[in-house]
Amino acid sequence: MNKLKEHKTILVGLLLCLSLIGEALVIILGSAHRDISGTVNIGKVEIPFNSLQGTIQTFTLMCCIMMACVDCYFGAAVSAILVSLMATMTSFKIIMSRNLAPVPGVLNGLLALVVVLLIGYLLRRAKKKSITDYATGLLNSVGFHEVLNKRIREKKSGSLVYYQINNFRAINDDYGHDIGDQVLRVAASRMKKVVSEHGNIGRIGGSEFAILLKNDVNALEVVKNIFEELNVKIQIQNDGIHLDCYIESNAGIAHFPEDAKDSVNLFKCADVALMQSMDEGSNKIAVFDEKMSSKMHEEKKMEQMIKKAYDENYFFLEYQPQFSVNDKKLRGFESLIRMNSPEGGRISPGQFIPVAEKSNLIFSIDEYVLNFVTKEFASLVKNASYELTISVNISANGISRPEFVSIVKKCLDDNGFPPKNLEIEITEYSFEDSQDQTVKNIKELKNLGVKVALDDFGTGYASLARLMNLSVDLLKVDKSLVDDIEKGKVNRDFINSIGSMGHLLNCKVVLEGVETVNQLEYIKDLNCDYVQGFVWGKPMSYEDAKSLI
């Protein structure tokens, strides 16, 4: 952004110089040739003076118009002044000489002035629209970052507040997007009322706002006042229907230049503080501190390690078998990504996967596992005496990518892996964002012949209506539900009902995390198809999986 502004400034300066040079030439020629019917000799060529003067004036006017196009603020203002002066000087010349020959030049100048003013107005309006959020009238992400970067360049200190409405998605789902937009407008209005002249507010995501506060303001007090304003009931009137909405929110605060000296890291600090506040519960505020800074540095270190993992072979895969409950027949394997530490030992997926998801490095991990598994198991699944299924976990962000299905198809084609033997595992949280794209991708995967499994079922957002529309092949009951299977009949009945529901939807049902023989005995009486867990098979290497097949 800074480089673009530098280039615009240089270009405006260049055009201004050309305009001034053109106008100077017109003045010099006019002084040297008072007879406009005469000619000017350039080498051996004789050019009518009025033609040469008109050409130079036209060139000058074009430079002014280009200046207005390049910079709708400074460039347009300078252009308007120059064109006005040119038209005035030409008009004065007509009056003094009582010669009407320059009249077309005056008309051209006036026309150019109108064009310059119109271009400046339209571009300024387009610029304002491009940095304004349509729903709230606040700055959008682009506009807010411009203001923030300007403040940082000017070395002015201040605070950044990262504010999130937690239940906005529920409001949208329950009442519709029109109501959701009205709630956002009310929330924005109340924020502006509190912040007033103390800073700037931007909507940078669906339910996420950023607030830039000046140094002389107590950021914590301002945010507390925002919470008080937004905790008051929001009343919405829509098509004769009266609705009362309540907002649940969290906020994280970071200071600059104390916490970070650039906008990217400042937002990371505020985001870390926001996540900390959400860990503490709803309607909480957290201020970035050294402890959070240490956590952020650890995440950066992990990011670098993930980036190196492919070249340094830190990543490897293990495969956990799934068996039929009734006859212990092998159904297939779930592929599990693992990571070695450069210092020795292993790094838990619970450490590197969340970091990868935050930084979008998870996309490359998804693709790595897909390609590795389809390449490694291609010949085995083709030669197996029955339909062996290999499952690959895909992140919530990954399954919502528009290009995801084409990535899967490329892996299948490149490695000669049969689509019917591949199963894509997604979690219920995949529907939290980009729901339409996720559903579209699932349907396209099914059309390819790829199976789809819903992982960690019973802990997230999946509804019965959504399951009916998705037509997934497998429900994987979360381990947390299996852990309680021995505690009472209610727990077992609950799992049994999930199994019955799955069968009604033409899904098979897998119980994850079955670790003891006692759990296995209870499961045999439930309405479930497969078992995955330590009781019958721990995650194993490819060679061990091959031997098991």
Image: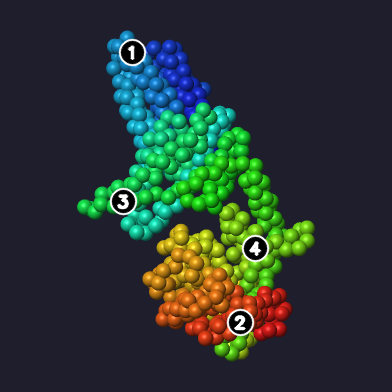
Q: Earlier in the sequence, mark 3 or mark 4?
A: 3
Query: Residue tagged by mark 3?
Result: 244
Does the residue at mark 2 contact the one at mark 1 (Cβ under 8 Å)? no
Q: Earlier in the sequence, mark 3 or mark 2?
A: 3
* Percent position of residue 157, x then y: 56, 31
Kindly report the distance in space between the C-alpha atoms of the residues bearing marks 3 and 2.
50 Å
Q: Residue at x 34, y 54 (%)?
A: 177
- The disc at residue 92 is 1
Nearer mark to the viewer, of 1 and 3: 3
> Three-letter amino acid code at disc 1?
Phe
Query: Residue tagged by mark 2?
Result: 518
Kindly report the distance in space between the C-alpha atoms of the residues bearing marks 3 and 4.
43 Å
> Three-letter amino acid code at disc 3?
Asp
Q: Secondary structure at mark 4?
A: helix
Does the residue at mark 3 contact the one at mark 4 (Cβ under 8 Å)? no
Does the residue at mark 1 contact the one at mark 4 (Cβ under 8 Å)? no
* Percent position of residue 294, x then y: 67, 46
Q: Secondary structure at mark 1?
A: helix
Query: Residue tagged by mark 4?
Result: 349
Kindly report the distance in space between the C-alpha atoms of the residues bearing marks 1 and 3.
68 Å
Kindly report the distance in space between the C-alpha atoms of the residues bearing marks 2 and 4.
28 Å
Residue at the extreme left of the image, as rendered: 240
Residue at the extreme right of the image, as rendered: 344
Q: Earlier in the sequence, mark 1 or mark 4?
A: 1
Nearer mark to the viewer, of 2 and 1: 2
Q: Secondary structure at mark 2?
A: helix
**Front residue (pair 306, 112):** 306
